[in-house]
Image: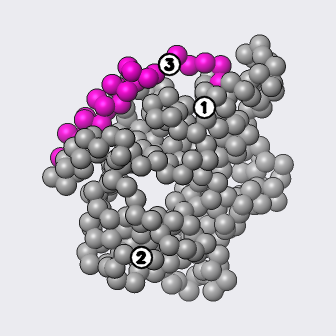
């Protein structure tokens, strides 16, 4: 089954952007993934074996059966072994904060400990390929949490929504004026309600938009993207992209154009391959 996305119940759309699901079978081998920094928080239920960690080395840790993570400032490496099924929720940071107490800078939250019955139920349905049932169970659970813990959007959440709508280009001072607050007052409300400061969220929103546009068109003009996304110039765009992805925009563009079945392509130089941080499978043993 290919990657699929689904819209949430209308009652959740101010908190949840979408649900997603994926079913992969790597046989006796393993598959490497790279996850770029994102502008949303991911709630994920796994049925299978996946390890995650830093691209810069060190041991990988096995992902819990249910986890909450997101808004990291560095890309991550993941290794999946054998059959892996995952059902997830892409939610706005204020949703993760209201429903689960999330805040920026926290490592992956293991929700299987706090919600063991839900974790077991969703995992069992995934192993049975009962995807619709699992998704409906997940949505009912979120609606229940919303009823128990949800709150009306405050000025911080309203300002964050404007940041998303502006692709990270709205200025906190301008937003404060629109909301009849001082900039310092809005900044306090923002962190308290959203769980992350406006500058960091704006940075991540703009980076993911840049990443997505390069994915769709690797040969797009970087100067034009810099203008459209509010960077000072092309050099500023390149520095920011490299800081968050550990590769230049052009190297990423060439990576996108590769046939995924031909990692060691002649299209990239050894230096570019090193910059990409390409990893290759080493069998079915747990990665170290």
Percent x, y of residue 281: 41, 80
Question: Residue at (21%, 43%) from the top-left corner?
Answer: 121
Q: Quadrant of the N terminus?
A: bottom left
Which stretch is magenta?
129-156
Pointer 3: residues within 10 angstroms few (<14), some, or many (20+)?
Answer: few
Question: Residue at (67%, 32%) from the top-left corner?
Answer: 191
Residue behind mark 3 = 151
Question: Residue at (71%, 63%) from the top-left corner?
Answer: 242
Q: Distance between the Cα atoms at labels 2 and 1?
A: 35 Å
Q: Earlier in the sequence, mark 2 or mark 3?
A: 3
Residue behind mark 1 = 194
Q: Distance between the Cα atoms at labels 3 and 1?
A: 12 Å
Residue behind mark 2 = 287
Q: Which residue is situated farthest in the front direction here?
A: 113
Q: Quadrant of the C terminus?
A: bottom left
Mark 1 residue element: helix
Q: Is residue 106 visible?
A: yes
Q: Is residue 67 left or right of residue 162?
A: left
Q: Nearer the viewer, residue 94 or 224?
A: 94
Mark 2 residue element: loop
Q: Is residue 128 left or right of residue 220?
A: left
Q: Distance between the Cα atoms at labels 2 and 3?
A: 42 Å
């Amino acid at each position: 089954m290919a990657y699929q996305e689904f819209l949430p119940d209308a009652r959740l759309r101010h908190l949840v952007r979408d649900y997603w699901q994926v079913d992969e079978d790597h046989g006796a081998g393993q598959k490497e993934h790279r996850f770029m920094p994102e502008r949303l928080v991911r709630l994920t239920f796994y049925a299978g074996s996946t390890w995650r960690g830093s691209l810069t080395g060190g041991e990988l840790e096995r992902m819990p059966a249910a986890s909450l993570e997101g808004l990291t400032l560095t890309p991550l490496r993941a290794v999946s072994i054998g059959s892996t099924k995952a059902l997830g929720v892409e939610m706005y940071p204020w949703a993760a904060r209201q429903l689960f107490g999330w805040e920026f800078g926290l490592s992956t939250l293991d929700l299987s400990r706090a919600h063991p019955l839900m974790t077991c139920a969703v995992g069992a349905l995934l192993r049975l390929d009962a995807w619709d049932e699992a998704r409906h169970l997940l949505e009912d659970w979120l609606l229940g949490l919303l009823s128990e813990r949800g709150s009306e959007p405050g000025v911080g959440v309203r300002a964050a929504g404007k940041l998303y709508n502006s692709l990270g280009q709205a200025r906190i001072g301008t937003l404060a004026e629109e909301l009849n607050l001082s900039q310092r007052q809005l900044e306090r409300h923002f962190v308290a309600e959203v769980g992350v400061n406006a500058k960091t969220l704006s940075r991540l929103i703009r980076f993911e938009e840049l990443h997505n546009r390069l994915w769709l068109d690797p040969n797009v003009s970087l100067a034009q993207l810099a203008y459209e996304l509010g960077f000072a110039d092309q050099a500023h765009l390149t520095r920011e992209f490299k800081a968050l992805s550990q590769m230049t925009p052009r190297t990423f563009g060439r990576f996108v154009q590769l046939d995924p079945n031909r990692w060691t392509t002649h299209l990239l130089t050894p230096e570019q391959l090193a910059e990409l941080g390409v990893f290759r499978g080493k069998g079915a043993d747990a990665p170290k």
